[in-house]
Amino acid sequence: MKFFVDTADIAEITELNDTGLLDGVTTNPSLVAKTGKDFVATVKEICRLVKGPVSAEVTATDHETMLAEGRKLAGIATNIAVKVPLTMDGLKTCKVLSDDGIMVNVTLCFSPAQAILAAKAGASFISPFVGRLDDIGHDGMALIADIVQIYNNYSDFQTEVLVASIRHPMHVIEAAKLGADVCTVPPAVLKALVKHPLTDKGLDAFLADWKKTGQSILGGN
């Protein structure tokens, strides 16, 4: 499974990218707005830091303007994935951009039917929002299961399932069990994946025992 981080915070991206565990970044207008920085300049800096796909979202809602914005965003760097909403105009834009060899991330997916259309339009990624479905009493992971099953039925569907709106580590685990291709997670959730109280307890015990020996690996002969 690939890990993308869902943020536009350059410091967070730099820290996580240095671990070698980061495969890409997803952004949206809301995340960039939180930084208070210029949108295009921020996206360009992220693309410089990260080798993998960087999703940058259009803000228009009509096809012609979406297409123009998408082409401008794609011109920022070769690893840009233009993010478009799952509307008819968004799918039309996805088809044109994908036919031109541009990566497209179709976002705001909430049904298997929508995911089928995105794959037909040539999307590189489909972004189902599991957390938002859970918030209204639906089973977000059931949507992931349905999309993975459908995509696996058709070898000509090359769209990767990018699980979005992740709220906690169990969303990541369940997505991995279902065979999703990518999880895009907030920095706090990605960092939480490494945490376990028994790891901390075991490490404390090892260090206490080592201290009693009075030895140093670096200071020895």
Image (cartoon, rainbow, N blue to C red):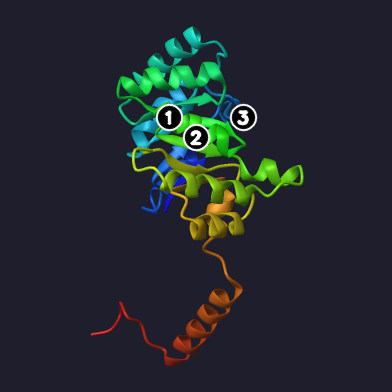
Q: What's the residue at 55%, 10% (across, down)? A: 62
Residue 136's place in the image compared with 35, above or below, is below
Q: Secondary structure at mark 2?
A: helix
Q: Mark 2 belongs to which amino acid?
A: Ile
Image location of residue 134, percent across then percent down: 71, 47
Q: Which image quarter holds the N terminus? A: bottom left
Q: Is residue 38 visible?
A: no
Q: Are marks 1 and 2 in contact (CB under 8 Å)?
A: yes
Judge from the rendering whether residue 34 lies leftward or rightward of residue 79; answer left or right.
Answer: right
**What is the spatial separation of the Cα atoms under label 1 and label 2, in whole angstroms?**
6 Å
Q: What's the residue at 56%, 58% (across, down)? A: 174
Would you name the residue on which mark 3 appears?
34
Residue 213's place in the image compared with 75, above or below, is below
Would you name the residue on which mark 1 appears?
120
The residue positioned farthest toward the top in the image shown: 64
State which mark lies toward you, 1 or 3: 1
Image location of residue 173, percent across then percent down: 54, 60
Tell me which label, 3 or 2, sits earlier in the chain. 3
Image location of residue 60, percent across then percent down: 55, 13
Q: What's the residue at 51%, 78% (across, down)? A: 203
The quarter holding residue 24 reads top left
**What is the spatial separation of the Cα atoms under label 3 and label 2, in whole angstroms?**
33 Å
Q: Nearer the viewer, residue 188 or 143?
A: 143
Would you name the residue on which mark 2 appears?
116
Judge from the rendering whether residue 208 lies leftward or rightward of residue 120; answer left or right.
Answer: right
Q: Residues within 10 Å of mark 1 (few under 14, many from 20)?
A: some
Judge from the rendering whether residue 221 lies leftward or rightward of residue 114; answer left or right.
Answer: left
Q: Secondary structure at mark 3?
A: helix
**What is the spatial separation of the Cα atoms under label 1 and label 3, in whole angstroms?**
34 Å
Q: Mark 3 belongs to which amino acid?
A: Lys
Circle on res. 162: none
Image location of residue 30, percent across then percent down: 61, 28
